Amino acid sequence: MSAPRGEFSSRFGFLMAASGSAVGLGNIWGFPTNAASNGGAAFLFVYLLLAFALAYPALMAELIIGRRAQANGITALRSISSGKKSRIAASVVGFSGIITVSLILSFYSIVSGWMIAHFFDAMAQIFGISTVSNWLTTDHPVRNSIFVVMFMTLTVFIISAGVRNGIEKWASRLMPSLIAILILLIVYVFTLPGAGDGLRAYLVPDFSRLTEPALLVGAMGQAFFSLSLGVGTMLIYGSYISKDENLPVTGGLVALLDIGIAVLAGLLILPAMYAALANGVEIFDVNGQLIAGPGLIVSVLPSLFETMGSIGIFVSLAFFLLMAIASLTSSISMLEVPVAYGVEHHGIDRKKASIAVGVVVTVISLMIVFNFDPLFDMVVTFTTEFSQPLLGFAFCIFVAWIWRRNDILLEIKQGCPDAESGFFWKIWPFYVKFICPVAILTVYFQ
Ligand code: PFF
């Protein structure tokens, strides 16, 4: 017996949830630093192109399968497959998505834990408790474990409350706050000396970099990770969209919000880094590259906040709150993938399924925390550079080559009755059938 399924109550609810999944550490941390180290606006240009031409069609593939099947990833992919072989392939892809997304969550929760620790550090500074502050900002497995558990508890708490009372309610509160904090921080950072240099590093294009494979691979990986593609998060959120909703428009809005917030984040991070430089903080590594790894968030930016005097504590509070919100709205979408499968396929109660999956992911995270050097980079590379693009490729194959074209059109027509004569239907099928798979594989093998 499967439990009754949830549904988002409105387009706004879905938009906040899906853009909440998409907008995460990838946008605020990954995108700006990727752009700055890969030719500034040249990267931005390629990113926009790939995001609209490759990632948006792949996003639509997941949303359409999800809404049609009204089911978790494995059941959904199986339901659009007709032969025995394709049903087996559907199960393999669905399971791989569940494993990949759980592994992504296991490293994501570690980084998100750092954000919460730094948020508490700003609080401790406000109350003048410097011993606590030192402990919070010193990288240590015990500190990291505590914050992983805290972050995963929050994630489980929201997911166990269900689609409307958990995901939609929290995403609708958190996403508008995220946008407001981001804009306030940008306005403030623009007033700092040195910010203009950051803006130049971000926005002045170096077109000589356009042909570099690293730029292409970086931009595609960024677009896929950022739109949470390939692992079934968008499919499961799509399965909770009402049948009256116009899918091409709604999916387009999610892509626009995701890209818009990434571009905005660049207006915060790069001016902030160059403002830090103007204050004597080192922002380049030994190879002369901008510091882009953990050092940026846990050392460069905190050093900048320190140079701002007492206002810096509040800027730091706002910044780490922004990062924590961005992480949480993404992590809930990751946890929903295995939980929905457990609830629908095995009839497990939602609360029990959320706790059980949450515990498994937390244990994996703790294993990574205590074996950080060998494991962290390996899990990140395996999931985001190897597994995610391949699964994105598989989703395109399922929609374009296995699912019947007429059924797809019927699904899109619900909520968009004139789809057949519209622009979307004229080019999207061709895109997912030929352009997306070939482009994904080409960039992948680069
Ligand atoms: N899109 C998120 C980000 O940009 O940080 C990361 C993400 C969320 C990846 C959900 C995968 C996923 F299923």
Image (cartoon, rainbow, N blue to C red):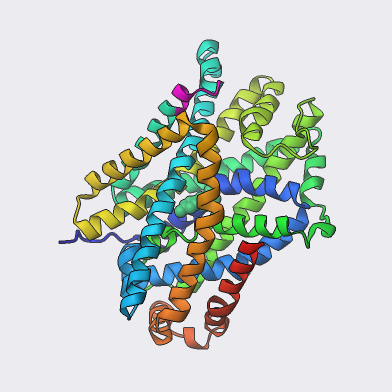
Relative depth, front residue between 378 and 149: 378
Q: On the picture, is 196 further left or further right than 365?
A: right
Above or below: residue 189 compared with residue 387: above
The image shows residue 223 at horizontal and vertical percentages of: 59, 58
Relative depth, front residue between 360 and 164: 360
Residue 20 visible? no
Q: Quadrant of the N terminus?
A: bottom left
Residue 356 visible? yes
Q: Residue at x 38, y 32 (%)?
A: 149
Above or below: residue 138 compared with residue 410: above
Quarter-wise, where is residue 13 in the image?
bottom left
Q: Quadrant of the C terminus?
A: bottom right
Q: On the picture, is 20 further left or further right than 88?
A: right
The boundaries of the magenta stretch are 138-144
Q: On the picture, is 261 further left or further right than 207?
A: left
Above or below: residue 361 compared with residue 252: above
Quarter-wise, where is residue 33 in the image?
top right
Q: Residue at x 54, y 71 (%)?
A: 57
Q: Is residue 139 a member of the stretch shown in magenta?
A: yes
The image shows residue 264 at horizontal and vertical percentages of: 65, 49
Q: Is residue 427 a member of the stretch shown in magenta?
A: no
Relative depth, front residue between 305 and 403: 403
The image shows residue 137 at horizontal and vertical percentages of: 56, 22
Above or below: residue 185 compared with residue 441: above
The image shows residue 313 at horizontal and vertical percentages of: 61, 23
Q: Residue at x 66, y 55 (%)?
A: 218
